[in-house]
């Protein structure tokens, strides 16, 4: 267990905490800027956000550790199951509270945009590291 913790779990837990905190603070700031003093979605919304962030961090760790050399195939192999997990999380939420009409479109757009952003950053960072190691 210590080996797993040191190899990837410690980093994943740290990233999860940072991303969840950032998402929660951003959500609160946007609500306050709009004049809403209380989160109308309440605690269930926080739990749903936590689950979606967990799926995103799992996707990141899968992408880093999946033994597939081709970047495109690795991205597809990570994106499809994690996107399905995100859809499942939204679907399960309907049993707790009513979903917005655009819930599935919202999760698709937000998850895909973040997946693409993180993927582009990872590819650019890898190319910069490869260039600097060759010099």
Image (cartoon, rainbow, N blue to C red):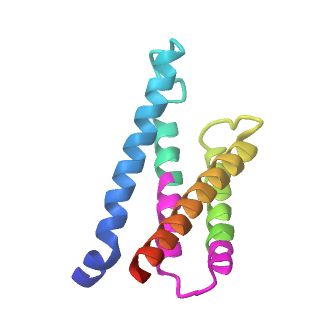
Tell how many labels. 0
Dominant secondary structure (helix, strand or loop) of the stretch shown in magenta: helix
Which residue lies at the image location 53% right of the left edge and 23% below the top edge?
Answer: 40
Q: Measured along the vertical axis of the image, is residue 33 above or below residue 131? A: above
Which residue lies at the image location 41% right of the left edge and 46% below the top edge?
Answer: 20
Q: Measured along the vertical axis of the image, is residue 105 above or below residue 120? A: above
Q: Measured along the vertical axis of the image, is residue 4 above or below residue 17? A: below
| Left or right of residue 109, residue 120 in this image | left
Q: Is residue 60 magenta?
A: yes
Which residue lies at the image location 66% right of the left edge and 61% below the top edge?
Answer: 83
Q: Toward the viewer: 31 or 75?
A: 75
Q: Is residue 82 magenta?
A: no
Q: Quadrant of the N terminus?
A: bottom left
Give residue 23's position: percent from left, percent from top. 46, 40
| Left or right of residue 51, residue 106 in this image | right
Q: Toward the viewer: 3 or 103?
A: 3
- Magenta stretch bounds: 53-77
Give residue 112's position: percent from left, percent from top. 67, 55
Give residue 115's position: percent from left, percent from top. 60, 58
Give residue 122's position: percent from left, percent from top. 51, 66
Which residue lies at the image location 65% right of the left edge and 58% below the top edge?
Answer: 88
Q: Quadrant of the C terminus?
A: bottom left
Q: On the image, which quarter does residue 43 sit in?
A: top left
- The outermost residue toward the left is 2
- The outermost residue toward the front is 135
Q: Measured along the vertical axis of the image, is residue 62 above or below residue 89? A: below
Q: Toward the viewer: 55 or 111?
A: 111
Q: Toward the viewer: 98 or 89?
A: 89
């Amino acid at each position: 267990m210590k080996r797993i913790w040191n190899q990837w779990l410690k980093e994943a837990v740290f990233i999860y905490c940072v991303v969840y905190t950032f998402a929660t603070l951003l959500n609160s700031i946007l609500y306050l800027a709009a004049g809403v003093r209380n989160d109308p979605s309440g605690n269930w919304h926080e739990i749903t956000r936590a689950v979606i962030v967990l799926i995103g961090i799992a996707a990141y760790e899968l992408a880093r550790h999946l033994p597939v050399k081709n970047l495109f195939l690795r991205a597809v192999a990570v994106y499809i199951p994690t996107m399905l997990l995100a859809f499942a999380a939204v679907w399960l939420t309907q049993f707790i509270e009513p979903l917005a009409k655009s819930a599935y479109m919202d999760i698709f757009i937000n998850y895909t945009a973040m997946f693409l952003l993180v993927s582009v950053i990872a590819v650019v960072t890898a190319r910069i590291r490869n260039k600097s190691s060759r010099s």
